[in-house]
DNA sequence: TTGTCACTCAACCACATGAATGGCTAAGGT
DNA sequence: ACCTTAGCCATTCATGTGGTTGAGTGACAA
C-alpha cells in the first residue's frame, strides 16, 4: 500500500517520494517537540504543507508514522562510529551525532521514557541496540589495554559518562545550561566536554 | 473552593486531606508514566480509588493537578543537600534522592522535554533552580580548593557528570542498563557510580 | 476512454475533559 | 431527635478535538 508508489512510472513517483519525505521530516520535528501523545497529526501535516489525510494514506496513520521513523533511526544507527578514530575523535563524533539534530535525539528520549508505542517490535531491536552498546564498551576496554586511555576507571564508566553527557543537553537542557552556563548544543559545550573527557581519561602522570 | 476543606471542623478534614494526598500520589505515578499529554484523569482517579470528578473538585482539573505537583516539587527541592557531608556522601545523597522514587524524577524529565504546561510560572522558579545549581558548582569548587577532590577537572564538569549519571537511569534506562549490565535503579549501580566518581576526583598520586 | 496515481474534501467516530445534577453517609451542632 | 454540612460517588451532558474513513478529482499514460 505504502510502497505502491515506488514501482510506478517513476516520473511522478519521485514527487510522491519527496512528499513522503517532507511528511517524515515534519514528523520528526513534531514528535521531537511534543512526544507521541502530545503530537498532532494536523500539526505534522501543516508543517509538511500537505493534507492531513496523506498521513493515513502513506503511513497508515499516526502509529505507522512513528514506526517508520523508528525504522529509519535503526538504519541510521548502523553507520555512526568511524573505524580508526582516536578516543577524542570518537567522543566528538558521538556528541555531534547526538546534538546536530536535537529533534531526532529528543524523539529517542521520548521513546525511552515510554511515550507512545512502548512494546513495538522491541525484541529484535532492543537486542541489536544492546549489542551495539556492548561493542562500544569493548572498544573502550581495548583503548585502555592499548594504553590510549587510563585503566584507572572502568570502561563502562568512561563510556557511560560520554553517553550521558551527550544526552543530558537533550533531556535536561536547563540543568546543563544552569551548570555550565552555556548553550549545551553549542560547539563550545562539545569541545569543553571532549577536553574534560580527555583529561579524565589521561593516563596518570 | 479547593481550600474549603482546610478551614473546616478539622476532625473530618483529615480524611479529606488523605484523599487529596492519594490523588496526588496517583497523579505522580500516572504523569510519571505517561507524561502530561499521555496521562488520563480517569486513570488517575482509578489509581487513587476515587471518583474522577474529585480531581476537578479538589484541584480544578488536570492542569491544576500538575501545578500542585510542581509546587510540591519546588518545596521538596529546598531541603536536599546535607550540610557537612563529604563529596562521596553528597553524591550518594543526590543519587538516592533521584532514584528512590523514579516516578517523580520521570516527571521532571517530562517537564524538561516540554511536555505539558511549559511556560507556567517559569521566571521565578527557573531563577531559583539556576541559583541552586550555581551554589552546587560553588560547593564543588570549594571542595577542590580545600583539596578534598582533584582540581584537574573543572568543577562544572565534576558536578555535571554526577547529575547526568543520576538522571541517565531515569531518562535512558535501557542505555544505561545496556552499558553497565545492571539495573540502574539498584543499589549496585549507585554504589558503583559513587566509587567511580570518587576515583575520578581523586587527587593525583 | 479507461485506468492509475497523487492527492483532496467532507464527514465521521471515538473519546477526554469538565461541569452539572442528584443522592448518600457520617459527624456535629442545636 | 432533628437538621445541617462536609465528603464523596454515580450518572449524564456538552464540548472540543484528534484521528481515520470513504468518496471523489485532476493529471497523465496507455
Image: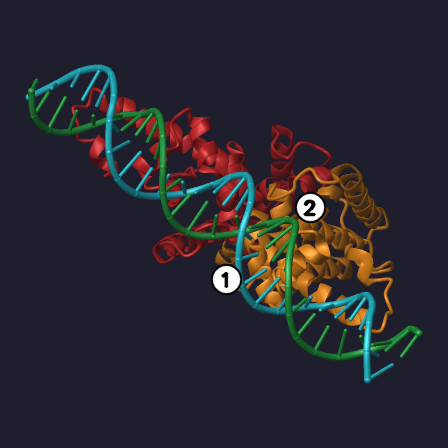
Chain colours: A red, B orange, C green, D cyan
Nearest the eye: A101 or B194: A101
Give residue B41's position: percent from left, percent from top: 59, 56
Residue drawn at x 41%, y 50% is: A132
Specify few, some or many for label 2: CA neighbours under 10 Å numbering under 14, 14-19, or 20 or more: many
Q: Residue at x 52, y 31 (%)?
A: A100
Would residue A151 be seen by someone viewing this image from the given angle?
no
Gap in Å between the C-alphas at discs 1 and 2?
Answer: 23 Å
The answer for which chain carries disc 2 is B
Quadrant where the N terminus of chain B sits is bottom right
How busy is the neighbourhood of tag 1: few (under 14 within 10 Å), some, or many (20 plus)? some
Q: Is disc 1 in the same subunit as disc 2?
A: yes
Residue bearing mark 1: B181
x, y percent for residue D25: 25, 21
User: In the rendered image of this protein, does residue B15 appear above or below residue A171?
Assistant: below
Identify residue for label 2: B160
**In the shown orientation, is residue A125 left or right of residue A155?**
left
List x then y, in percent, for residue A107: 49, 42
Disc 1 and disc 2 in contact, CB within 8 angstroms: no
Q: Position of residue B121 (x, y in %)?
A: 75, 40
- Chain to which mark 1 belongs: B
Which image quadrant for residue B122? top right
Q: What is the tally of numbered marks visible in this picture? A: 2
Image vertical order of residue A12 relative to residue B11, above or below: above
Q: Residue at x 74, y 54 (%)?
A: B73
Height in image: A48 above or below B188?
Answer: above
Q: Is B9 rendered above or below residue A186? A: below
At horizontal 60% and vertical 34% (from top left) the residue drawn is A190
> Where on the picture, by quarter, is residue B129?
top right
State which tag comes first along the sequence, 1 or 2.
Answer: 2
Amino acid at each position: 500500500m505504502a510502497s505502491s508508489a515506488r514501482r510506478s512510472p517513476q516520473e511522478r513517483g519521485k514527487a510522491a517520494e519527496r512528499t513522503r519525505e517532507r511528511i517524515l521530516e515534519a514528523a520528526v520535528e513534531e514528535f521531537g517537540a511534543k512526544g507521541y501523545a502530545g503530537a498532532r497529526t494536523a500539526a505534522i501535516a501543516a508543517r509538511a504543507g500537505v493534507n492531513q489525510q496523506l498521513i493515513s494514506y502513506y503511513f497508515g496513520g499516526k502509529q505507522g508514522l512513528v514506526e517508520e521513523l523508528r525504522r529509519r533511526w535503526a538504519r541510521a544507527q548502523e553507520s555512526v562510529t568511524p573505524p580508526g578514530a582516536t578516543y577524542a575523535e570518537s567522543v566528538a563524533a558521538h556528541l555531534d551525532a547526538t546534538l546536530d539534530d536535537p529533534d531526532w535525539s529528543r524523539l529517542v528520549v521520548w521513546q525511552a521514557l515510554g511515550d507512545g508505542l512502548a512494546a513495538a517490535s522491541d525484541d529484535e531491536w532492543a537486542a541489536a541496540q544492546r549489542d551495539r552498546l556492548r561493542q562500544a564498551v569493548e572498544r573502550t576496554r581495548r583503548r585502555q589495554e592499548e594504553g590510549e586511555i587510563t585503566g584507572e576507571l572502568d570502561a563502562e564508566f568512561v563510556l557511560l559518562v560520554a553517553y550521558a553527557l551527550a544526552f543530558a543537553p537533550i533531556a535536561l537542557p536547563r540543568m546543563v545550561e544552569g551548570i555550565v552556563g552555556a548553550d549545551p548544543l553549542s560547539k563550545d559545550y562539545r569541545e569543553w566536554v571532549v577536553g574534560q573527557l580527555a583529561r579524565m581519561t589521561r593516563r596518570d602522570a
